Image (tube, rainbow, N blue to C red):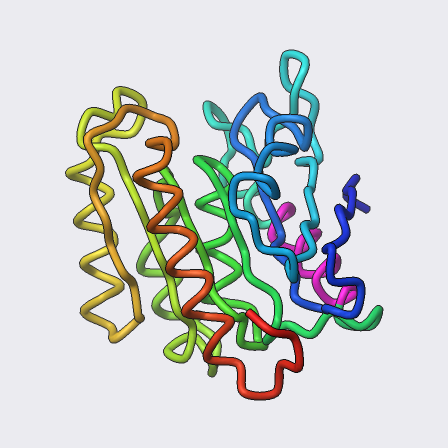
Amino acid sequence: MLDYELIPAKDTASRKQLVVLHGLGDSIEGYRWLPSALKFPWLNYLLVNAPDEYYGGYSWFDLYGDADTGIRRSRKLLAELLDKQREEGYPAEETALFGFSQGCLLVMELGIRYPHPFAGIVGISGMLHDVEGLIREKSDVALQQRFLVTHGTYDPLLPIDPVRRQIQELQQQKIQIDWREFRKEHTIAGEEELKVICEFLNSCYSAIKSSPSAL
């Protein structure tokens, strides 16, 4: 099982949830600032640690070795966690995914493969793994999913051009990706990018007709 922590919403009746996946070498500690930055009183936050220790933090897969095995393992563990959350009263359709770098890759994997629709998926400064496999194995609800994917035009770790081409391949398959480029490196571009993320999440949750909580 994965190590995780739930930061409850101020609105204690809300079952809306944002599952947060960190990048290489980071941990849940790196995202404790997110609830106060997004300022959604109706949103629960599930901060998740990757399974492998990595220089004081954690890793979702071996970046320099057998990445495929690690990605499959982490995807399976996350799907099990999401299934568990559904059993505990957090419906997939009221759950959004948020991932940075390696976490971005995993939320894209889940968003395209998981058999239940999410409220929305936010991927930041990441890349994709085996685009052909993603397209071939996409779930029956993949075309219903809404994605916001952002990247930095100055990213020194993951240059933007190959990532842009990967996203275009998915868009050609009618996967709903809102692609945004920011003048940034391998990071989150402060208030400018947070505003776009907030608007996207608010739009996703506002579309949930069954939700009783005020947005």
Which percent across, then down, holds residue 62?
A: 54, 28
Horizontal side of residue 8 vs 196, given as left or right: right
Which percent across, then down, holds residue 15?
A: 72, 69
**Number of labelled discs?**
0
Horizontal side of residue 132 vs 118, given as left or right: left
Horizontal side of residue 41 vs 147, given as left or right: right
Q: Residue at x 47, y 83 (%)?
A: 140
Q: Depth check: give the residue in front, 14 or 132.
A: 14
9 to 70, vertically: above or below: below
191 to 93, vertically: above or below: above
Q: Which residue extends farthest front?
A: 214
Q: Quadrant of the C terminus?
A: bottom right
Q: Residue at x 28, y 24 (%)?
A: 185
Q: Residue at x 72, y 68 (%)?
A: 14
150 to 178, vertically: above or below: above
Q: Which residue extends farthest bottom?
A: 210
Asked if the magenta segment contains residue 165, the reply would be: no
Which percent across, then down, holds residue 163?
A: 24, 43
Q: Depth check: give the residue in front, 185 or 195.
A: 195
Horizontal side of residue 166 vs 193, given as left or right: left
Q: Depth check: give the residue in front, 71 or 59.
A: 59
What are the residue bounds of the magenta stretch?
Answer: 73-85
Q: Picture quarter containing residue 154?
A: top left
Which percent across, then down, holds residue 112?
A: 45, 66
Q: Depth check: give the residue in front, 75 or 22.
A: 22
Q: Residue at x 58, y 77 (%)?
A: 116
What is the magenta segment's predominant secondary structure? helix
